[in-house]
């Protein structure tokens, strides 16, 4: 699996460069931006990706940037560095998607740990996204009648009950059940349920 690019957003050139050099020492790709607006205009949504952003910046600050990304549907892991972690802005940042808040002055070890956690989370998120996409692809192979049976199987209904519910013969339902399991490449209804939940998380 590819390692993420770390996007560093900080209006302070010296502070930004310190983070950039740290990221490079971790053998990770890095891009830097002098403002939140600069990042918004240049980032194309490519993943895997993580962000390290300062909280206090002219124009759009770090918390506002995090909220903007959330509104745009961009859910990359974010490490926010702040000189003063007041409770309201901390809550806003966490709700917006920040996974770690580090107070200044911060040491290299603390910042490195935050970046490592972001990298791990991004890899986990991408794997989950892959599993969801595959589950949706598999469910999409079912025709309408198979979908009707699958929905009732997921509810835990027996073949006889499903046959009655759908006004179909028992052998027809058994055949469709067998086809469903084969199409989804699973051996049991329990495995079917796992795929169904992945494809329909809500």
Image (cartoon, grey):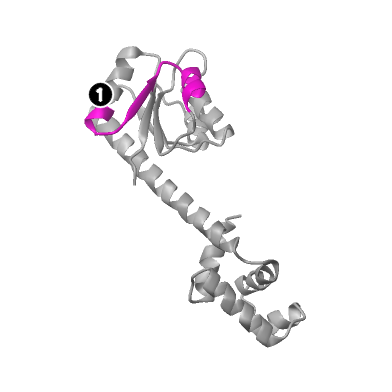
The image quarter in which residue 164 lies: bottom right
Residue ranking furthest to the right:
167
Judge from the rendering whether residue 37 lies leftward or rightward of residue 169; answer left or right.
Answer: left
Segment colored magenta:
21-43
Residue 81 x, y percent position in the rendering: 38, 26
Residue 169 x, y percent position in the rendering: 72, 86
Q: Residue at x 70, y 71 (%)?
A: 145
Count of all numbered marks drawn on residues in the image: 1
Residue nearest the observer in this picture, 151 or 59: 151
Residue 103 x, y percent position in the rendering: 35, 26
Q: Which residue is mark 1?
A: 21
In this rendering, is residue 200 above or below 15?
Answer: below
In this rendering, is residue 61 above or below 130?
Answer: above
Q: Is residue 159 magenta?
A: no
Q: What kind of element bears circle 1?
A: helix
The image quarter in which residue 102 lies: top left
Placement of the C terminus among the 4 image quadrants: bottom right
Residue nearest the observer in this picture, 102 or 144: 144
- Is there any visible trace of residue 83 in the rendered image? no
Judge from the rendering whether residue 28 lies leftward or rightward of residue 181; answer left or right.
Answer: left
Q: Residue at x 51, y 28 (%)?
A: 88
Q: Is residue 28 magenta?
A: yes
Q: Residue at x 68, y 86 (%)?
A: 170
- Is there any visible trace of residue 143 in the rendered image? yes
Neighbour tally class for label 1: few under 14, some 14-19, many 20 plus, Cα within 10 Å: few
């Amino acid at each position: 699996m590819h390692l993420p690019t770390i996007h560093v957003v900080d209006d302070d050139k010296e502070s930004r460069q310190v983070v950039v050099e740290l990221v490079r020492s971790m053998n990770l790709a890095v891009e830097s931006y002098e403002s939140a607006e600069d990042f918004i205009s240049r980032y194309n949504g490519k993943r895997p990706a993580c962000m390290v952003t300062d909280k206090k910046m002219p124009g759009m600050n770090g918390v506002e940037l995090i909220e903007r990304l959330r509104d745009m549907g961009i859910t990359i892991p974010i490490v926010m560095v702040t000189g003063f972690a007041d409770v309201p802005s901390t809550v806003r940042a966490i709700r917006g998607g920040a996974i770690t808040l580090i107070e200044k002055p911060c040491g290299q070890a603390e910042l490195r740990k935050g970046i490592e956690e972001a990298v791990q989370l991004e890899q986990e998120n991408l794997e989950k996204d892959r599993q969801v996409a595959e589950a949706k692809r598999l469910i999409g192979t079912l025709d309408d009648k198979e979908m009707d049976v699958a929905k009732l199987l997921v509810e835990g209904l027996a073949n006889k009950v499903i046959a009655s519910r759908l006004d179909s013969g028992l052998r027809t339902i058994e055949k469709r059940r067998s086809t469903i399991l084969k199409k989804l490449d699973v051996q049991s209804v329990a495995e079917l349920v796992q795929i169904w939940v992945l494809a329909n998380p809500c």
